[in-house]
Amino acid sequence: MSETTYQIMAIVLYFLVMIAIGLYSYRKTSNLDDYMLGGRSLGPVTSALSAGASDMSQWLLMGLPGAIYVFGLAEGWMAIGLAAGAWVNWLIIAPRLRTYTEVSNNSITIPSYLDSRFKNNTKVLRIASGIVILLYFTFYVSSGMVAGGVFFQSAFDVNYHTGLMTVAAVTIIYTLVGGFLAVSFTDVVQGTMMFLALILVPALTIVSLGGVGETVTIVQDVNPDILSFFAAASATGVISSLAWGLGYFGQPHIIVRFMAIKSVKETTSARRIGISWMVISLVGAAATAISGFAFFQANPELTLADPEAVFIVLGQLLFHPFIAGLLLAAVLAAIMSTVSSQLLVTSSALVEDIFKAVFHADAKDKTYVNLGRLAVLAVSLIAMIFAWQQNDTILGLVSFAWAGFGASFGPVVLLSLFWRKTTGSGALWGMIVGAVVVFAWGYSPLSGYLYEIVPGFILSTAVIILVSLKTYKPNKEIEAEFNETMSRLQEHKNK
């Protein structure tokens, strides 16, 4: 049996497990709340691994190792910023958002929460939020499609478009059928696969080179700057990399996990599990890049055509073909876990936040669930069209979408949870400014000097505060919900 056959067998097995989870979840999905939020039933392990797997995506196994392979640990500032941002997100956003969304009309999406939080009866804020989600998630989902095509191209020399369509098809099936529960349960499997893979690949690579000392010596002899956090870094570069952490507060596909967890109490355990998973995985990604650099220097007869494929190629060279296939499936897991989460949030934006708001629809839950499934399919097809021509790096596509959400929703979510005088007008204009600034800055020469999330986040925050101060009027219902949220959080602390 050939090596390729073993690897394909492992990947087919992974695909079958994902589809089986989707079918299992289908039986537990009876209404729109189940389909979009899993009935707020997630435990801490599922919440933590689902948030992590949805967050890290193909960037963790392909984008980050590729960047560090080329530029060295100067790219590691991004990982530091992400780890810090994720920890703060779990610490201060998770408990408040879980509580406030339940108090405020049991909101099941971020746009519906914002609409309910500010009592914006015109639905303008809700529709605008849904449009921003559609806009930036199209880029984000297409980055996953690109990664799927690159994966099959690098691993099996398969046509890019064939790989793209294969990943899209399986992801669409289990997301469309099983909804939020399928996405969350598959994330647990996928997160575990990613975690183990990022330990095994660098560990065996280092062993093959003779140990940590020999690996470091090879790297230092060729390019010692690879091991430096500062040699290839500029002040604006470090700021831009650390600023990735700001994006966490506004990522709908991540913070929706906070809304779905069983209780506020569970957020503490979930934070510890999630951050431990994340830190070890990030260290593993950096170790993969550095050990991979040393490996190809020590074996000049081997070539690495694409630095973003360093994890894939090392797995194929160093492991038994079937194990290598499972490691390759971990790359697919990273891609598909994020794409499925993004598809579901985009579907919810279309159905719950745009269709319902625009048409004031009042249909049966089954009708909305079916509309949600149609939305998953429609968004997938549009994303595939965007991804058909591979015209950007995976990291480039992800960074643009990450900045868009971080600047659009981050300041709004933070201020809505912590400042009772935040107004709907302030939130609307802040969100628009954040989205526009990221788009304009990202497509200007300035993007080469400073990551667009920095000006976008700052200006969005400033606009929200200024407009809210100008438009604030006391509202008894808003005050009551804010006080109820604070009261419940205090009760939790006192237990």
Image (tube, rainbow, N blue to C red):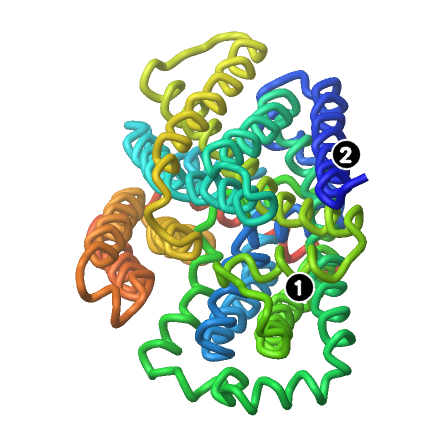
Residue 13: image tag: 2
Q: Residue at x 55, y 49 (%)?
A: 154
User: Quick check: 408 above or below 221?
Assistant: above
Is residue 448 rendered to the left or right of residue 484? left
Between 12 and 91, the residue placed more toward the observer is 12
In what element is the residue under mark 2?
helix
> Circle 1 — which element?
helix
Cα–Cα gap, marks 2 and 1? 24 Å
The answer to whether residue 195 of the structure is visible from this angle is: yes
The picture quadrant where one finds residue 129 is top left
Amino acid type, mark 1: Ser
Which quadrant is the C terminus positioned in? bottom right
Q: Earlier in the sequence, mark 2 or mark 1?
A: 2
Q: Residues within 10 Å of mark 2 (few under 14, many from 20)?
A: some
- Which quadrant is the N terminus positioned in? top right
Judged left or right of residue 60, residue 451 is left
User: In the image, is residue 426 above or below residue 141?
Assistant: below
Q: Which residue type does callout 2 highlight?
A: Leu
Which mark is in front, 2 or 1? Answer: 2
Quadrant of the image occupied by residue 359: top left
The residue drawn where x is 53% and y is 31% is 168
For residue 281, which numbered disc appears in the image?
A: 1
Q: Is residue 397 left or right of residue 153?
A: left
Q: Position of residue 54 (x, y in %)?
A: 58, 47
Give percent across and percent down for residue 285.
61, 66
